[in-house]
Amino acid sequence: MADQSYLDWPFLEPQHKQLASDIDAWAQSELPPLVDAPDAHDDVDKTCRKLVKALGEGGWLRYCVPAAYGGALEGLDVRCLSIIRETLARHSGLADFAFAMQGLGSGPITIFGDDRLKQRYLPAVARGDKIAAFALSEEEAGSDAAAMTTSLRRQDDEIVVDGEKLWISNGGIADFYTVFARTGEGSKGVSAVIVDADTDGLAIAERIEVIAPHPLARLKFENCRVPADNQLGLDGEGFKIALSTLDIFRTTVGAAALGLARRALDEASHRALARKMFGGALSDLPLAQAMLAEMALDIDAAALLVYRSAWTKDVKKTRVTREAAMAKLFATDEAQQIIDKAVQLFGGLGVTKGQKVEELYREIRALRIYEGASEVQKIVIAREHLGRFAAEGV
Ligand code: COS
């Protein structure tokens, strides 16, 4: 049984505790047939589609959209999103991925879309009938997102998109993409538009295989035309739309890392107690105890940063760029270390295919890169920190 004592911490309300228990019970009963099926990780497209459908039927995707459009709550509650991601990730990295991408891909519509776009996309996202994707990164514009070259221009009552997007999660299975493209110079020259997957001029140029299988693709836009009212926000607001959506979802990436790390600690603890060694159990050895202690400590520290950031966004309703960056950076980097320790405690078994800790070892790696690499989070934290000093005068 996973340690859930953190649910009594002051950042969370009784409804969060209830949600954690409900999603955990659902995940225990519904996920195994979906993610433990023999072909689940070979045919990730099919598995992800089934997961999105199941998450929709279970009512969990309603937390990705506001109540007025079929959602569970008035707006996005980062603590609910974090609890759902943490719990799903503890059971299955792929289930967490399926949930998270519905939220990230539709988040810009929730935050910046007009009523018409919200009506068209959000209820279907909440039901799991439409799969969403967020298309920001390019070959030469990953961390330096403002260096993107994909262009967007208005022609009469249409918007024309040309260029390529890379590392796009849900690429190939999404029903629509939130695309960020250039209309002018620098970060002020980026706009955002919704492109349906079946639009002429949009093609999946390449499917990308990764160490922990997820649907991922390179998209090609060639004279791709969508109605002008598919634009989100105003001309030049695209970068703000992307980064304020990421402010919400970066915290939840930290939560997902926390879920993977908690599972690693659970696995390692059972193993340490059961494994016979030197006339006793592995858990009797001081070196093993030190590892387990460090894992438990880092999990609590990560949880504090994740739920501090989520609480600040939900309750204080302030911009949480710094808090989200700290949560994502610490939780993902530490989860990598925690999972590595779990593999070490398992010994040879830890690197054996089919072992949960081996799967976790592959699952965690991308979280330190996507939605802003660890180095980007350090840039963000340092800028905010130095900005405060500069504002006071040197
Ligand atoms: N909310 C609202 N607006 C924001 C914002 C936020 N969280 N963060 C930045 N902005 C605004 C800024 O205020 C700025 O506008 P003003 O000049 O009017 O203040 C504008 O956006 C540009 O911001 P900034 O100057 O920080 O842009 P940079 O190009 O220097 O940003 C980093 C640098 C590295 C921080 C940014 O490019 C980044 O986060 N990169 C990673 C992108 C990413 O996460 N990619 C993964 C894609 S999803 S898998």
Image (cartoon, rainbow, N blue to C red):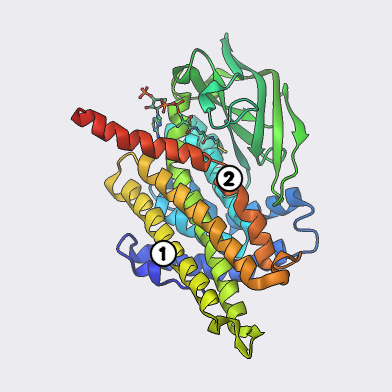
Kindly identify which residue carries mark 1.
300
Mark 2 or 1, closer to the camera = 1
Q: Residue at x 72, y 54 (%)?
A: 47
Residue 59 seen by the camera: no
Kindly identify which residue carries mark 2.
101
Q: Position of residue 190 (x, y in %)?
A: 50, 20
The reply to whether discs 2 and 1 touch (Cβ–Cβ < 8 Å) is no
Q: Amino acid at mark 2?
A: Met
127 left or right, relative to 362: left
Q: Position of residue 31 (x, y in %)?
A: 65, 65
Q: Position of residue 279 (x, y in %)?
A: 63, 91
Q: Residue at x 68, y 71 (%)?
A: 347
**How many neighbours does mark 1 have within 10 angstroms: few (below 14), some (14-19), or many (20 or more)?**
some
Of all residues, the one furthest to the bottom in this rendering is: 279
Q: Amino acid at mark 1?
A: Asp
User: Nearest the camera: 230 or 303?
Assistant: 303
Q: Position of residue 242 (x, y in %)?
A: 48, 32
Q: Quadrant of ligand 1?
A: top left
Q: Secondary structure at mark 1?
A: helix
Compared with 314, 285 (above or below) is below
Q: Residue at x 50, y 21 (%)?
A: 191
315 left or right, relative to 207: left
Compared with 19, 315 (above or below) is above
User: Nearest the camera: 132 or 371?
Assistant: 371
Q: Secondary structure at mark 2?
A: helix
Compared with 321, 18 (above or below) is below
